Image (cartoon, rainbow, N blue to C red):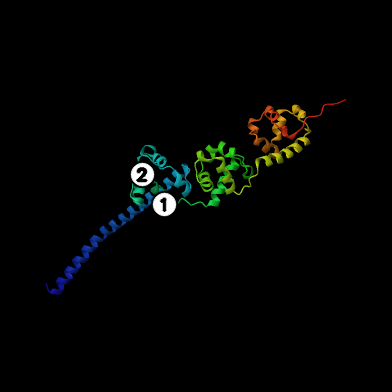
Amino acid sequence: MNLNNLKNSIDDSATKSKTKQKPIDQTIGETKQEVEKLTEYSKQEAKKFILEAFKNLGVEDTYAASIFPLKKFKEFFSLKNIGEEKHDLVNNYTLELFGSKLSNMLHSDFLTLGNSIGLSEISEKEQKTKFLALLAEIGIKLDDMAFTHIKSNSSFLWKQACTSYVMEKACGSRQARDLKKKDFLKLCDYFGVKRIDKKLKKDELENDVKQFLASKGIKHIDDLAYVSKSEFLKFFENKSFRNYLEIFGIKKSNFTIQKALNLTNNFGLTKKLDDKY
């Protein structure tokens, strides 16, 4: 065999060898792609599961995430609570994201996790709007908002992160237990609510109530004795009457005729003069 024939023979062998290896290389490449696809799918599944969990926990924005107790988060995502499959799914995701297992997460990791799954940052204006919507749910208008409204409904209001947000902005503390009357005044300032001197407000309302009652045929203290409780309750539909009684801690829910009669000024009414004839 001459040199050229030998060279051609070697080239043919090499070509045949490469031809045999090509399917193997292709298989490895395809397998790698499948693994990458599976890994990406697992990431998306983990993100979807975590996002749904956040919403169930009331964590719907980055501020809510910043104040959410890490202990509660870990309890929710515990192996016992979500099962081995979901726990491994989330664990693998957090390991890749910031190199830490769920059990070793710091609060800063929690915020990183929230950002990675697409939690949005809600503006101050939106937070205030959400808080006003909460007040509306319990029948409170901003202009009529009172300290007792906030305190008596604290368990409901503080379930939402927007309450903590506006309290922290207005008063310096987001905790319900820290809210004092002076803080409530700061809250009013924050929302631009004009504060009216209580005595001036009472005097102004008293005149309105007196006129309202007169329109119902009640012009003297003695006339109150002839008004039934059901009639009194209808009076609460009048804003001035309702707000006037609330100054004295009387609401429709706890109203009694005796409470109304016990008011020192009796709606600003006077006693009927004795008949001299």
For marks 2 and 1, the one nearer the N-term is 2
Q: Is residue 141 left or right of residue 219?
A: left
Q: Residues within 10 Å of mark 1 (few under 14, many from 20)?
A: few
- The residue singled out by tag 1 in the image is 116
Q: Is residue 91 visible?
A: yes
Image label count: 2
The quadrant the C terminus occupies is top right
User: Where is 25 relative to 162, above or below?
Assistant: below
Q: Which mark is residue 102?
A: 2
Q: Is residue 26 left or right of residue 8?
A: right
Q: Residues within 10 Å of mark 2 (few under 14, many from 20)?
A: many
User: Looking at numbered disc 2 in the image, what kind of residue is underneath it?
Assistant: Leu
User: Looking at numbered disc 1 in the image, what kind of residue is underneath it?
Assistant: Ser
Q: Position of residue 207 (x, y in %)?
A: 74, 39
Q: Which mark is residue 196?
A: none
Residue found at x 26% / y 61%: 22
Dot 2 and dot 1 residues touching (CB under 8 Å)? no
Q: Name the element at disc 1.
A: helix
Q: Quadrant of residue 144?
A: top right
Q: Is residue 26 left or right of residue 151?
A: left
User: Where is 202 relative to 190, above or below?
Assistant: above
The quadrant the N terminus occupies is bottom left
Q: Name the element at disc 2.
A: helix
